[in-house]
Image: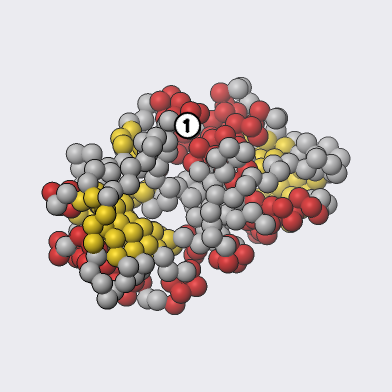
Amino acid sequence: MNTKTAKVAIIGAGLAGMYAAYLLERSGVKDYVVLEARDAVGGRIASIEGFDLGPAWFWPGYQRRMDALVSELGLARFAQFETGVMMMERSRDERPFMAPGYVNSPTAMRLEGGMGALVDALHRRVESGRIVTGQAVRRLRCGADAVEVECDGGAMSWRVDHVLLALPPRLAVQSIEFLPALPQALTAEWGATDTWMAPHAKYLAVYDCPFWRDMGLSGEARSAAGPLAEIHDAALPGGRAALFGFFGVPAGVRKRVPDEEMRLLCRAQMARLFGPAAAAPQAEYIKDWALEPFTTTAADLEGAGQHALAPAAAPATGAWRGRVTGIASEWSPQFPGYLAGAIEAATLGTGAI
């Protein structure tokens, strides 16, 4: 086995992991490694042609640190479009109807280029050689003077002083073997923490223009008929238009429905709510996070995937005390599950090193 050394190992190259690397670089700590199981960075952030298939919004009005980072990186932002009325449907047997639109307060903001632009900007500012993709960590072994990090297949390992877990708490305890075991109460707490977005899926329909706006519609909809339960305008400023929706169909049911059949049902729903033009998107995408093995566990499919209360981020006693810290969004005290939570948790975790 090829064993390398570093001061810090960051497990996961989503927003939390990339921001942690950025903070370490900025503080003068160059001796770190980021180990990412996927073949690319980003984690639960997934953008295609500037549209988000993962998280899309942040709220500068109260997520100050996230707002400051966006400004620091020079990223362009724009407000979520919410002008006009929203569409509602109670069942397939009733015609959809209009209702007063919902307006976020404070304003929900999006990034030009999608949230992928945020990860890309961080990626450009850290040493690329410190990021190793395609390396799923399977075992952490805590010794007297170092932690040994073993990757999938046993071909690579690292000896480090500290491990930052930039992956969901539940995924960490279910996919990584800790030797010796973490304190039992902490393992139970991490295992009981829902992974944000894990049971959810999004449908995106791309059009050449936001025709619904000309009809006085905000692009927002709520539906009890499905398959999409909640729909929003996803148009880009000065560019292509889109609508996206969150599926209301449980993950277990989605798995049994062929992809093309699900797309057909989504197009039919868009047409019911926004007219015939909505039935013919230029492109359409489905991102089912329940199918992502580096995000979701079997236990996540039984939960709601909501913003849960943050568990303890590190062991207070035992061999692992001072050796491992959770920095994924779920560990954020103020914004667990949100993008801003990844920023907060990574800030707290790197500050403890």
| Residue at (54% x, 60% y) in the render | 304
Q: Position of residue 48 (x, y in %)?
A: 33, 50
Look at the numbered disc 1 and give the secondary structure of its residue. loop
Q: The C terminus is located in which quarter?
A: top right
- Position of residue 144 in the picture relative to residue 49 (left or right): right
Measured as percent of width and height from the top left, residue 46 is found at: 41, 50
The answer to whether residue 320 shows anywhere in this view is yes
- The answer to which quarter of the image holds residue 173 is bottom right
Q: Horizontal and vertical percent for residue 103?
A: 33, 42
Which residue sits at x=18%, y=53%? Answer: 212
Amino acid found under the numbered disc labelled 1: Tyr
Which residue is situated farthest in the front direction here?
A: 100
| Residue at 74% across, 56% down | 188
**Residue located beneath label 1 in the image:** 62
Does residue 13 sit above or below 277 in this rendering?
Answer: above
**Residue 146 in view in this figure:** no
Residue at the image position 27 percent from the left and 67 percent from the top: 269
* Label 1 CA crowd tier, 10 Å (few <14, some 14–19, many 20+): few
Q: Position of residue 341 (x, y in %)?
A: 54, 39
Front position in the image: 257 or 154: 257
Depth order, front residue of 110/128: 110
